[in-house]
Amino acid sequence: MSLGLDRHQSLSSRERVRLALDHQETDRIPIAMVCSGINPPARRELEVYLQRERGIDVQTYLDGLLDVRSVAPAYVGPSLAADEDIWGVRRAAFSYGSGSYDEIVHYPLAEITDVSDLDDHPWPSVEWFDYASLPERIAAANADGEHCLMVSNGNIFETSWYMRGFERMFLDWALNPELAHTIMGRVTEFYVEHFSRMLAAADGAVDLAFTADDIAGQNGLLMSLEMWEQSLKPYHVRLNAAIHEFGVKVIYHTDGGVMDAVESLIDMGIDVLQALQFSAKGMDPRVLKERFGERLCFEGGVSVQTTLPFGTVEDVREEVEELISVLGAGGGYILGPSHAIQAGTPPENVVAMFDAAATTRC
């Protein structure tokens, strides 16, 4: 370590993350599960394993490790159906055997053909949230010690296509750009106001604002970089600027082979690149750190596609140690899985990831 361990023996989770985001090394690498989680079948197996091997439940185990926690205001808006979100999107569960995923079954703007028709859609309002509830929720999140707190979820393109349909949004950008940009403009207006109110209510207690939009797949960008620059980037620039007014850092999620867009993402105003799907084409942690590490921080990286589900305990430990050595050098890295830990992932591997992260030094 470049900083003496004795100086960091009593760091809070918040202090640990803030040092890392300031590109300083700490007592251990910060650990988080941003845009992640453990799918129910894997969580049940982990529960059995932890109870048997350590006499502890999953939540207690994670609470002792994770440095980042999410907070959100209370929802006080109109009643929503169990399968419906605030945007009018409806989902249904589709089984994969031992569990299920919720997939969209109703796109409320799918049949819209003219901008004027958008006025008939029941758009959500920031008045549907009780921002005054945040201080109490922040206090509850920090009841066992001060944590790095995060608010979410500014996924502008995804929210738009959840309402419109994925293919239709791409067609709109080409054939009906006024409609596409009006939808995305309304979504952005909501998120700018929502984040501004959350951060004002948090009064300095929140350090991270989670935003997202998957712009890449396994083999590269989902669209040309030029299309992304014209059709999506300006909306995130606006949202990020609003977040930065509160001195809060933007942590941005995208899966896939996103290397070609990282320079532009930095220009867009992100502070932390999240997910880090290194099994995707062109994604290399050493290149990422060498090219962008002085201007960007990173979160995630431990593969939920390869190493965690199919590797050995030793494979997991080696990957964790390598990521910490590369991305954690000089600070700037928060370790976590690259996405949700899937059914069938051996619980020994999940524990190996967290144990290695908690004990490996940069």
Image: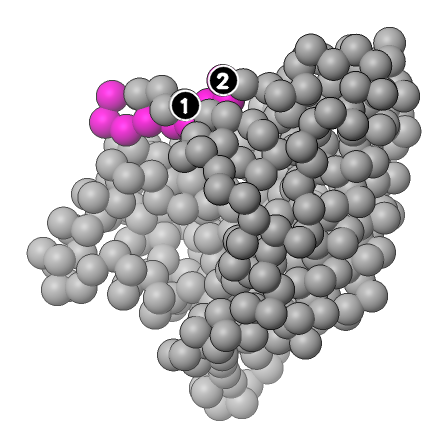
Which element type, helix, strand or loop, lies under badge 1?
strand
Please name the residue shown 66% across and 71% down the image. 201
Q: Position of residue 246 (x, y in %)?
A: 77, 69
Dot 2 amino acid type: Val
Q: Residue furthest left?
A: 52
The reply to whether the C-beta atoms of the residues labelled 2 and 1 are less than 8 Å apart is: yes
- Label disc, if present, on residue 92 of the rendered structure: 1
Q: How is the structure coloured here?
A: one colour
- Label disc, if present, on residue 3 of the rendered structure: none
Q: Quadrant of the N terminus?
A: bottom right
Q: Going by the image, does 95 lie left or right of 246?
A: left
Q: Is residue 181 above or below residue 175?
A: below
Viewer-closest of 175 and 76: 76
Dot 1 amino acid type: Ala
Q: Examine the structure image and report whether residue 94 is included in the region drawn in magenta.
A: no
Query: Is residue 147 something that shows in the picture?
Result: no
Q: Earlier in the sequence, mark 2 or mark 1?
A: 1
Q: Examine the structure image and report whether residue 103 is included in the region drawn in magenta.
A: yes
Please name the residue shown 22% across and 48% down the image. 46
Q: Position of residue 44 (x, y in %)?
A: 20, 44
Q: Is residue 26 above or below residue 104?
A: below
Q: Is residue 313 above or below residue 295?
A: above
Q: Residue furthest bottom?
A: 6
Q: CA distance from mark 2 to mark 1?
A: 6 Å
Viewer-closest of 196 and 31: 196
Q: Label 2: which residue?
A: 105
Please name the residue shown 48% across and 58% down the image. 32
Start-end of magenta stretch = 97-105
Query: Is residue 320 something that shows in the picture?
Result: yes
